[in-house]
């Protein structure tokens, strides 16, 4: 549920299945009027010679539409994430220390609601004791094998 940091589209993933809890770097947002537009458009403006493209609506400062420290999460997205965490069968926490709240608590909510909690992370997390599996292998190696195994088991 982390922010997408590449400009690649989420291939073959229905939009309703991705909750961008911490926002997205594929979109820019004005810090003044909150107008949103594509990151690609802003980068094209930079490539065309604009050193710091301003918001086309109000002239404000554009930034990636990601949540920064001290910014609150979108309450609608967080509510949906809580609902999904409480209803899921398997919860994967990948590449996260599970230290920053409220996102970290989703792993505990899922486990307490009966989901299989699987943590893939280089170091320990506060939720390791609740996990059905803790994987300390590199994500690029562990995740494909793990997803294949989950699919073979039927979820």
Image (cartoon, grey):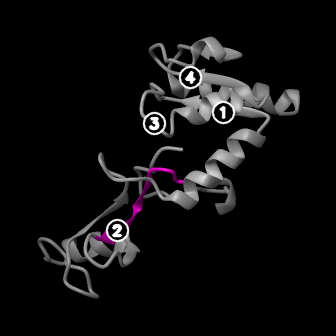
Binning the other alpha carbons within 10 Å of mark 4 as few (below 14), some (14 to 19) or many (20 upward) gives many
Q: Quadrant of the C terminus?
A: top right
Mark 4, mark 1: which one is toward the viewer?
1
Location of mark 4 (residue): 120
Location of mark 2 (residue): 28
For marks 3 and 4, the one nearer the N-term is: 3
For marks 2 and 3, the one nearer the N-term is: 2
Tag 4–tag 1 contact (CB < 8 Å): no
Q: CA distance from mark 3 to mark 4?
A: 18 Å
* Residue 77 position (above or below residue 82): below
Which label was assigned to residue 3?
none
Does the image show residue 50?
Answer: yes
Location of mark 1 (residue): 109
Mark 2, mark 3: which one is toward the viewer?
3
For marks 2 and 1, the one nearer the N-term is: 2
Which residue does the image show at 53% across and 15% down from the upper left?
Answer: 137
**Kind of element beneath mark 2:** strand
For marks 4 and 1, the one nearer the N-term is: 1
Q: Is residue 40 left or right of residue 141?
A: left
Q: CA distance from mark 3 to mark 1?
A: 12 Å
Q: Main secondary structure of the magenta part?
A: strand
Location of mark 3 (residue): 101
> Which stretch is magenta?
18-30
For marks 2 and 4, the one nearer the N-term is: 2
**Kind of element beneath mark 4:** strand
Q: CA distance from mark 2 to mark 3?
A: 24 Å
Q: CA distance from mark 2 to mark 1?
A: 31 Å
């Amino acid at each position: 549920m982390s922010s997408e940091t590449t400009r690649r589209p989420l291939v073959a993933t229905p939009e309703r299945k991705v909750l961008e809890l911490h926002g997205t770097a594929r979109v820019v947002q004005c810090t003044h009027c909150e107008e949103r537009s594509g990151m690609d458009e802003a980068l094209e403006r930079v490539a065309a010679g604009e050193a710091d493209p301003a918001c086309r609506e109000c002239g404000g400062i554009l930034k990636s539409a990601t949540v920064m420290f001290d910014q609150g999460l979108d309450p609608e997205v967080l509510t949906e994430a809580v609902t999904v965490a409480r209803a899921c069968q398997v919860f994967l926490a990948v590449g996260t220390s599970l230290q920053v709240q409220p996102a970290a608590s989703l792993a505990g909510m899922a486990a307490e609601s009966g989901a299989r909690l699987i943590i893939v992370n280089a170091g320990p997390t506060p939720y390791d004791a609740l996990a059905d599996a803790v994987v300390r292998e590199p994500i690029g190696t562990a995740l494909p094998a793990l997803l294949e195994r989950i699919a073979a088991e039927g979820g």
